[in-house]
């Protein structure tokens, strides 16, 4: 039978974990907490070049953006090493860890510029999409074909609140969004709201799907995927709410019923805002 002292020791150990080691017995060193891999926030050309690595895009509010990096810069040196490929840059950045300062030399208009971004932990792809677009003017559409009654361009909707939904006939979650978008159009359409469904489906496929799903709003075919690329679409459905001035005020990726009331409240607020001065009579 265990003594009361032993029973008490077991109880304390279970409640608080192992007791401190006795005097003269070395405790095992705590494992260091490793920082998350670093993230710079750029899209790079994937080819190899002795002239450095071309920056194709800089994510808004990313470490690269805050440090002053621009699209069309060429990264020549990263963390003291000459770089010739995007993979090499990625390895160096990931190895530095989030929170670290990174020395980057970029070539811009034949001049070398020294930058020192502070790396961050990599956001999710959905968060990157929001970082890139929230608060910016919605990109114009190009190479699109409107189906009957749909606008030919975003410019046609100037002065309206726009709900732009990227979808596809083969996308099962997209079907759940259709009744919601129909309801939004019915509720706010008379107050200056336009709802548009953008798809890379062929026009005939899109028209058939729209009829089968009971879509009551305009459908535009993104023939070459140029609009999808401009908006950074990586998954479907993805919805943008654009105010009367053309500024993106909300980005929603996937189907999230928990956010629907908040989005309806946002739209209700936006339709009460006055149109831009140039559109006033």
Image: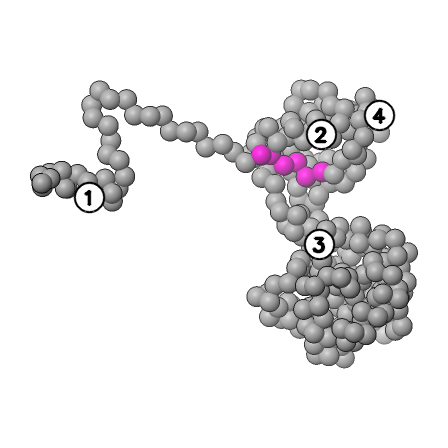
Callout in the foreground (1, 4)? 1
Q: Secondary structure at mark 3?
A: loop
Is 208 colored magenta in this rendering? no
Residue tagged by mark 1? 11
Q: Looking at the image, which residue is at 79% across and 38% down? A: 56
Q: Which residue is mark 3?
A: 235
Q: Is residue 279 visible?
A: no
Residue at position x 67%, y 20% from top?
80
Q: Quadrant of the C terminus?
A: bottom right
Using the numbered discs, state the Cα–Cα distance from disc 2 to disc 3 in whole angstroms: 24 Å
Instruction: Determine whether label 1 and label 3 are within 8 Å by CB.
Output: no
Which secondary structure, mark 2?
helix
Q: Are marks 1 and 4 in contact (CB under 8 Å)?
A: no
Judged from the image, the secondary structure of the residue bearing numbered disc 4 is loop
Q: Earlier in the sequence, mark 2 or mark 3?
A: 2
On residue 87, the disc is 2
Q: Quadrant of residue 165?
A: bottom right
Q: Which residue lies under the disc numbered 4?
A: 110
Residue 73 position in % (x across, y down): 79, 32
Q: Percent from the top left, x then y, of residue 172?
A: 70, 63
The residue segment tinted magenta is 37-42
Dot 1, how many residues are within 10 Å of its Cα: few (below 14), some (14-19), or many (20+)?
Answer: few
The local secondary structure at tag 1 comes to helix
Query: Counting other residues with Cα less than 10 Å from the Cα at mark 2, is it few (<14), some (14-19), or many (20 or more)?
Result: some
């Amino acid at each position: 039978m265990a003594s009361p002292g032993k029973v008490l020791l077991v109880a304390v150990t279970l409640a608080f974990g192992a007791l401190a080691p006795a005097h003269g017995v070395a405790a095992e060193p705590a494992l260091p907490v490793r920082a998350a891999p670093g993230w710079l926030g750029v899209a790079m050309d994937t080819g190899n070049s002795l002239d450095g690595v071309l920056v194709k895009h800089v994510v808004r509010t990313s470490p690269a953006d805050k440090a002053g990096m621009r699209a069309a810069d060429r990264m020549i040196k990263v963390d003291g090493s000459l770089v010739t490929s995007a993979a090499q840059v990625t390895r160096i950045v990931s190895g530095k860890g989030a929170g670290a300062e990174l020395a980057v030399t970029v070539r811009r208009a034949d001049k070398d510029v020294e930058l020192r971004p502070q790396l961050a932990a990599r956001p999710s792809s959905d968060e990157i999409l929001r970082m890139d677009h929230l608060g910016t003017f919605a990109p114009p559409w190009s190479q699109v074909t409107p189906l009957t009654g749909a606008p030919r361009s975003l410019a046609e909707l100037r002065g309206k609140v726009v709900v732009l939904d990227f979808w596809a006939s083969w996308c099962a979650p997209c079907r759940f969004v259709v009744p919601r978008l129909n309801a939004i159009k019915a509720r706010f359409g008379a107050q200056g709201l336009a709802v548009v469904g953008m798809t890379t489906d062929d026009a005939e496929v899109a028209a058939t799907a729209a009829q089968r799903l009971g879509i009551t709003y305009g459908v535009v075919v993104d023939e070459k995927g140029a609009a999808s690329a401009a908006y950074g679409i990586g998954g479907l459905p993805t919805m943008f709410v654009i105010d009367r001035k053309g500024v993106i005020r909300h980005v929603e990726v996937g189907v999230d019923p928990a956010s629907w009331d908040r989005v309806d409240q946002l739209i209700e607020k936006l339709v009460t805002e006055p149109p831009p001065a140039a559109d006033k009579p």
